[in-house]
Image: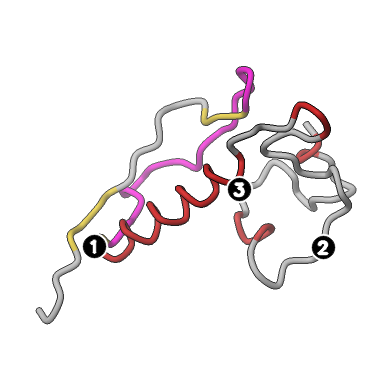
Amino acid sequence: LMQHDARWYPDPSAFRPERFGCGAPDLPRGSFMPFGTGPRVCLGQHLATTEMTVIAAMLLQRFTVSVPEGMAAPRPAFNITLRPECPLRLRLKEYLQGG
């Protein structure tokens, strides 16, 4: 629930990925811990982060990603980890080079 603390995140319930992007304000240590911390930190955190970066790069080279018309913003649900309440739907359109 740390990432829902209004001291660190203005409007904490809003989906704003730019909070974690380049140029975002620095946050105090412990205000966001996607892989835990301390002696029980996730052993696969570096591999998971690298894998997601590579997967995202490969997808974005091949597809244009959009949200289907009329789809509402995802609502978070807590179930061991934070996840969307309903399945997320995205539209992928193949990126055609030179055409």
Residue at the left extreme, as displayed:
99
Placement of 84 over or under 20, stated as above or below: above
Q: Quadrant of the image for the C terminus?
A: bottom left
8 or 74: which is nearer to us? 8
Say whether residue 70 is magenta: yes
Q: Position of residue 4 (x, y in %)?
A: 77, 38
Q: Which mark is residue 26?
A: 2
| Residue drawn where x is 33% and y is 45% of the image | 90
Precedes in sequence: disc 2 or disc 1: 2
- In whole angstroms, how far apart are the C-alphas of marks 2 and 3? 18 Å
Amino acid under disc 1 = Arg
User: Where are the magenta residues, as a range?
Assistant: 64-81
Say whether residue 12 is magenta: no
Label 1 element class: helix
Q: Position of residue 50 (x, y in %)?
A: 51, 52
Q: Give the residue number, with chain letter if any, for mark 3.
A: 15
Label 2 element class: loop
How many numbered marks does the figure carry? 3
| Residue drawn where x is 83% and y is 44% of the image | 31
User: Is the residue marked by circle 3 packed among few (<14), some (14-19), or many (20+) residues within 10 Å?
Assistant: few
User: Is the residue marked by circle 1 packed among few (<14), some (14-19), or many (20+) residues within 10 Å?
Assistant: some
Q: Are marks 1 and 3 in contact (CB under 8 Å)?
A: no
Q: Which mark is residue 62?
A: 1
